Image (spheres, helix red, strand yellow):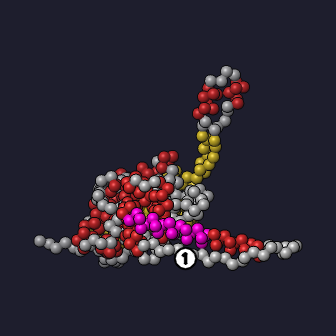
């Protein structure tokens, strides 16, 4: 019986996809994001947008009982943990709403998390930063509070009173500072005490409760936290996770092409009146569009790249509490689902008006190596989509496939660690092209995303 060849530490994924009239990500001015590469401007889809799309895609499938990670614990990234814990206290333990939310917020504040301005209703109960934690974190926090109601509520009362005293002292200092900075009075003001009460130090959260919050927010067995990592600076003793996935910004293999699409939106009620108007004057009153505007849209063939560090993934899972055997099983499942999400998931911005999420990649290349391999340099010289007869490379999709596979073949001849290379296409034209190219024997063409990883 032949012993199985051990897998390499890194799985590199490379993908080419052609998009038409979409806007998957935009900047603060609602314009497409761009970068300059190879001396020309390229359209860009940021790694943050890609990672979120893939993470949410995998999480939703797991929660629905589908995919390799079905039934596994997953994470949620939100600022609403106090609200979620409060709702759990209210719905499961019968607490009154305001009491539940205030207690949950106080407990999380006491653990070290910062919240929005208490005077602003919209952000008062939201943490300052997004917190990526297991989806059942709010349930665990609420269960601990309910089980230690007397102790927690006694602490909360003392904590809120100390906060009120500190806030009063802060206001007094501000008033004194403002008074000192104002012009001198024409007459001597009445003497008043100038001493300010020192701000009381806030009482520490009971250790058992703080420990319960830290355990609830810890990565634990949430597989997507082990994959993508998390950083929580506000609580120094809360474990952070170095992600096992590296994601590059996707960019067009050719120079950026953008259109400003003028649109006119109809007002249904206005059109109904016009249709039923009894005279041309009445009809004229209801002429014109209900609303007009512009939207920026982009088209092009994009190259994107990601890497999975198998060693880091297994380390993260074991640090979270899994045995070596459990971590191996979970890591294998996570790898399959990550590859599937890399192929299938797409950012959902303007998905209804552009149908962007229905796109499929023209080519996916996957291979193992002892280090990550980024093939962005294959497209440093932008693809010239001019006619081949005039010195161009023709349409960007097939031209990019030729470049990527030529680049990989060249590199693999010089790097002995590259192996188990596989390609997948959903484009019949590219499939025909693969049959025409002189592909190395080490490169296997597969028909399913799950076949891209051993």
Q: Is residue 52 magenta?
A: no
Magenta span of residues: 148-167
Find residue 243 and report its horizontal and vertical position in percent.
39, 71
Q: In which quarter of the image is residue 409?
A: bottom left
Residue position marked by numbered label 1 in the rendering? 201
Crowding at dot 1, Cα within 10 Å, few <14 / some 14-19 / many 20+, comes out as few
Q: Quadrant of residue 256?
A: bottom right
Q: Nearer the viewer, residue 8 or 403?
A: 8
Q: In this view, does 292 lie above or below 388?
A: above
Residue drawn where x is 68% and y is 72% of the image: 172
Q: Is residue 73 left or right of residue 115?
A: left
Residue drawn where x is 64% and y is 72% of the image: 169
Q: Quadrant of the N terminus?
A: bottom left
Residue drawn where x is 40% and y is 53% of the image: 94
Find residue 430 and report its horizontal and vertical position in percent.
37, 55
Find residue 230 and report its horizontal and vertical position in percent.
43, 70
Instruction: Pick out the residue farthest to the left.
Output: 1
Residue drawn where x is 44% and y is 51% of the image: 357
Q: Work out whether residue 62 can be spotted.
A: yes
Main SS class of the magenta portion in the image: helix
Q: Is residue 358 above or below residue 342?
A: above
Find residue 306 and report its horizontal and vertical position in percent.
40, 67
């Amino acid at each position: 019986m032949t012993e199985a060849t051990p897998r390499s530490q890194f799985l590199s994924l490379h993908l080419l996809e052609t998009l038409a009239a979409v806007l998957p990500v935009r900047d603060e001015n609602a314009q497409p994001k761009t970068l300059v590469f190879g001396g020309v401007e390229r359209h860009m889809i940021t790694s943050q947008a890609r990672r979120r799309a893939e993470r949410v895609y995998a999480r939703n499938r797991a929660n629905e009982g589908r995919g390799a990670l079905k039934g596994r614990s997953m994470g949620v990234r939100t600022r609403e943990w106090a609200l979620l814990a409060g709702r759990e206290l209210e719905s499961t333990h019968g607490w009154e709403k305001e009491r539940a939310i205030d207690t949950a917020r106080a407990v999380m504040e006491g653990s070290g998390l910062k919240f929005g301005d208490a005077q602003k209703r919209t952000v008062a109960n939201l943490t300052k930063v997004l917190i990526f934690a297991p989806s059942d974190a709010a349930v665990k926090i609420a269960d601990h509070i309910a089980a230690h109601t007397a102790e927690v509520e006694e602490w909360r009362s003392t904590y809120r009173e100390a906060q009120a005293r500190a806030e009063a002292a802060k206001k007094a200092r501000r008033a004194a500072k403002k008074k000192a900075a104002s012009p001198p009075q024409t007459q001597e003001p009445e003497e008043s005490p100038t001493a300010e009460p020192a701000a009381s130090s806030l009482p520490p959260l009971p250790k058992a409760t703080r420990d319960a919050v830290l355990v609830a927010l810890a990565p634990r067995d949430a597989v997507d936290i082990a994959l993508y990592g998390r950083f929580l600076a506000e609580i120094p003793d809360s474990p952070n996770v170095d992600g096992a996935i590296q994601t590059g910004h996707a960019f067009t293999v050719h120079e950026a092409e953008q259109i400003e699409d003028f649109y006119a939106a109809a007002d249904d009620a206005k059109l109904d009146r016009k249709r039923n108007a009894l005279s041309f004057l009445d009809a004229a009153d209801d002429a014109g569009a209900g609303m007009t505007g512009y939207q920026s849209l982009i088209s092009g063939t994009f190259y994107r790249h990601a890497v999975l560090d198998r060693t880091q993934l297994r380390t993260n899972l074991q640090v979270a509490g899994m045995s070596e055997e459990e971590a191996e099983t979970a890591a294998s499942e996570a790898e399959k689902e990550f590859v599937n999400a890399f192929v299938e998931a797409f950012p959902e911005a303007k998905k209804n008006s552009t149908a962007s999420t229905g796109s499929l990649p023209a080519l996916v290349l996957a291979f193992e190596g002892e280090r990550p391999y980024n093939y962005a340099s294959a497209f440093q010289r932008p693809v010239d989509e001019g006619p081949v007869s005039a010195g161009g490379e023709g349409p960007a999709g097939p031209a990019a496939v030729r470049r990527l596979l030529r680049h990989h073949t060249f590199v693999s001849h010089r790097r002995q660690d590259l192996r188990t290379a596989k390609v997948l296409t959903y484009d019949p034209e590219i499939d025909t092209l693969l049959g025409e190219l002189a592909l190395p024997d080490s490169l296997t063409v597969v028909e399913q995303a799950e076949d891209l990883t051993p």
